[in-house]
Amino acid sequence: MKTTLKTDWTIRDIVEGFVFDKNEGKGLYGLNGKLTIQPEYQRNYIYDKGGKDVAVIESILKGYPIGLIYFAKVAEDKYEVLDGQQRIGSIGRFVNTTYPFAVPDSDGNPRYFDSLSKDEQNKILNTNLTVYICEGTAQEIQKWFETINIAGVPLNNQELLNASYYGPFVTAARKEFSNSNNANMHKWQTYIKGDPKRQEILATALDWVSKHHVADYMSTHRNDADIEEVKNYFTSVIDWISNLFDYTGKEVRGLPWGDFYEKYHNNSYDKKEINREVSVLMQDYHVQDKKNIFEYLLGNKEHPELLNVRYFDENIKKTKYASQTSFATSMGISNCPVCAAGNNSNKTRIWKYEEMDADHVTAWSKGGATNISNCEMLCKSHNRAKGNR
Ligand SMILES: [Zn+2]
């Protein structure tokens, strides 16, 4: 990637023709139309009124540097902001009178650009910016993004992918999945973790449709304006979950629903029964991994280990060990009931406590409780053998 340093642009140049679309929170232009301040791949404007916006203007008024700014050269005399978008956005909004904000004076009174003295206005407008102009491929620019922090918030993986593959597909996909005002967003966020503005809902939608090959998928569809495939697939998954399970607590959020859909959506489930089981398991204190209840039930309970069932505590095990051992000693048999019933040298062996493990007499998955009346101490090898059945 080639970079050139440019220091002769002033704020006056940059804010010429400044456009800020408040509804979209994006689509800002400057440099008389030659600069796209918020390219498709950038995150939405995140400086808040009175926060960092104010700090940027105060720095300029005090003559402090506001840091390096990076532009990508996208065509002859056409640029996009790579880094500095939020600083330029703040400056543009302050100077431009459409959506202005105020900075406090030393007495705390609000001052808008219009109410500054001519000298102060000129001080701002004549401030030179330090701009690096970068020329390179999308991959080079992505590499570069990975090495910097933007406004102290590193880009996440999906934001980097949006940068690499920006084009009509990213534009359309963001419009659908990155808009917090989308009427479906609340429902989606029941099942998906993350912030739409940070592209995290989009990341999940792409992960599902591409079966975890997001970069390949984005590369293939880069120039499509049509996002029907990802939209339809996403809707199928969400509809499948929400039609099957009534439960909408926090445990359903962020599960790999795309994988579950692929694996299980052709199975038929008794909706009433499966929802009854969800609520029983949710209330069962033996079940430690509540999030896995859904996978356990979708998989017809074939993998009870998913639930990480609570084990017998030390007290129960020691009490049980003592009673089994005293009985076995008096009878002259092994304190492992399976060994005692066998026909080898372990038939009369008294195992040490450390050599035994507790077992559910009636398996937990068949409704057996985790209490002393359902506890039996077995030697480790017999316990393992029983667990594997
Ligand atoms: Zn044994």
Image (cartoon, grey):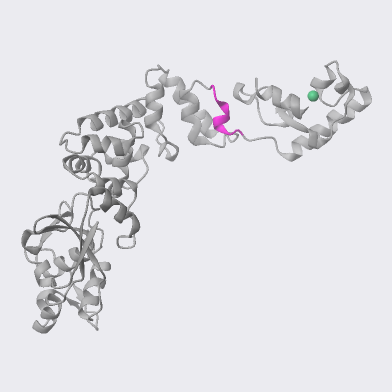
| Magenta stretch, residue numbers | 302-309
Left or right of residue 183, residue 340 in this image: right
Left or right of residue 356, residue 298 in this image: left
The N terminus is located in which quarter? bottom left
Ligand 1, what quadrant? top right
How far across and down, in percent of the image, does residue 123 sit?
Answer: 14, 80
Q: Is residue 51 visible?
A: no
Left or right of residue 134, residue 320 in this image: right
Question: Can you say whether 23 is above or below 85 in the image?
Answer: above
Tell me the residue at 8%/82% (across/down): 118
Question: Can you say whether 197 is above or below 274 in the image?
Answer: below
Question: Can you say whether 31 is above or below 218 in the image?
Answer: below
How far across and down, in percent of the image, does residue 247 sit?
Answer: 41, 32
Tell me the residue at 92%/27% (across/down): 329
Viewer-proximal residue among 153 and 196: 153
How far across and down, in percent of the image, does residue 326 sit?
Answer: 89, 30
Viewer-proximal residue among 19 and 314: 19
Q: Count the labels in the image.
A: 0
Tell me the residue at 24%/83% (across/down): 107
174 falls in the magenta region:
no
How far across and down, in percent of the image, does residue 232 sit?
Answer: 24, 28
Within the image, what quadrant is residue 45 found in?
bottom left
Question: Can you say whether 158 is above or below 25 in the image?
Answer: above
Q: Is residue 297 visible?
A: yes
Tell me the residue at 79%/37% (across/down): 354
